């Protein structure tokens, strides 16, 4: 089944501008805004509004209002995306040498093509999960 963006998401990422409103917006590490709005055009923030302008933005056509925190994309600096296929198949609490031995045995039970396919699926699934959780960059180890 083909997935498409919702019309509200399309408005926010198109060439036309749209307001994104939230109770909390992290504009910078040292700048957290309460009840603010961002004017977004083409995926880039054009303006930050607070106070009366932010309240007015909530009522504008095409405004996307969230009950949460809006922040820049997060970074997962240490991931093992290709190991997602082994989730739940290794004993929790094993020592590192035991864990590695079990992982190698599990890998050895698959032929090369099956392992490559499992790793590719795990990497794609892991990237999708990262995006759902707000991560836009990853350092895959």
Image: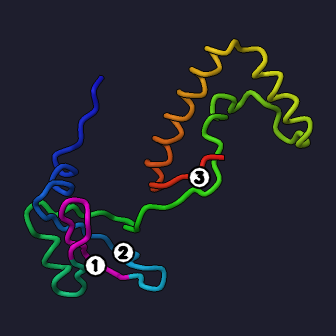
**Residue highlighted by disc 2:** 25
Q: Main secondary structure of the magenta part?
A: strand
Residue 101 spot, x, y in % from top left: 88, 30
Viewer-side label of 2, 3:
3
Q: Position of residue 129 (x, y in %)?
A: 49, 43
Q: Earlier in the sequence, mark 2 or mark 1?
A: 2
Name the residue that disc number 3 marks: 139
Give how far across and how far down residue 125 sits, in percent.
51, 35
- Look at the picture and state if 72 lies above or below 86: below
Q: Which residue is painted at 83% across and 22% down in the image?
A: 105
Q: Name above or below for residue 20 compared with residue 37.
A: above
Residue shown at the point (18%, 79%) measured from the top left: 55
Does label 1 or label 3 sit earlier along the sequence?
1
Q: What segment carries the magenta color?
A: 33-46
Closest to the observer, 133 or 111 = 111
**2 and 1 marks in contact (CB < 8 Å):** yes
Distance CA(mark 1)–CA(mark 3): 31 Å
**Residue 87, picture quadrant:** top right
| Secondary element type, mark 2 | strand
Residue at 11%, 70% in the rendered image? 59
Going by the picture, which residue comes out furthest to the left? Answer: 61
Callout 2 environment at 10 Å: few (<14), some (14 to 19), or many (20+)? Answer: many
19 with respect to 60 (left or right) = right
Q: Earlier in the sequence, mark 2 or mark 3?
A: 2
* The image quarter in which residue 103 lies: top right
Q: Which residue is mark 1?
A: 36
Q: Is residue 127 left or right of residue 53?
A: right
Q: What secondary structure is found at the residue carrying circle 1?
A: strand
Is-magenta flag for residue 4? no
For disc 1, the neighbor class at 10 Å (few under 14, some 14 to 19, many from 20) is: many
What distance separates the C-alpha of mark 2 from that of mark 3?
25 Å
């Amino acid at each position: 089944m083909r997935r498409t963006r919702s019309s509200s998401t399309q408005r926010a990422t198109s060439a036309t501008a749209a307001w994104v409103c939230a109770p909390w917006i992290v504009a910078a590490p040292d700048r957290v805004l309460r009840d603010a709005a961002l004017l977004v055009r083409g995926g880039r923030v054009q303006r930050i509004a607070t106070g009366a302008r932010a309240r007015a933005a909530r009522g504008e056509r095409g405004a996307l209002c969230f009950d949460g925190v809006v922040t820049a994309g997060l970074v997962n600096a240490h991931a093992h995306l290709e190991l997602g296929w082994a989730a739940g198949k290794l004993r929790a609490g094993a020592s590192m040498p035991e864990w590695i031995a079990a992982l190698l045995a599990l890998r050895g039970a698959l032929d090369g093509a099956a392992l490559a396919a499992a790793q590719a699926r795990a990497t794609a699934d892991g990237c999708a999960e990262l995006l759902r959780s707000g991560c836009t960059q990853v350092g895959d180890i």
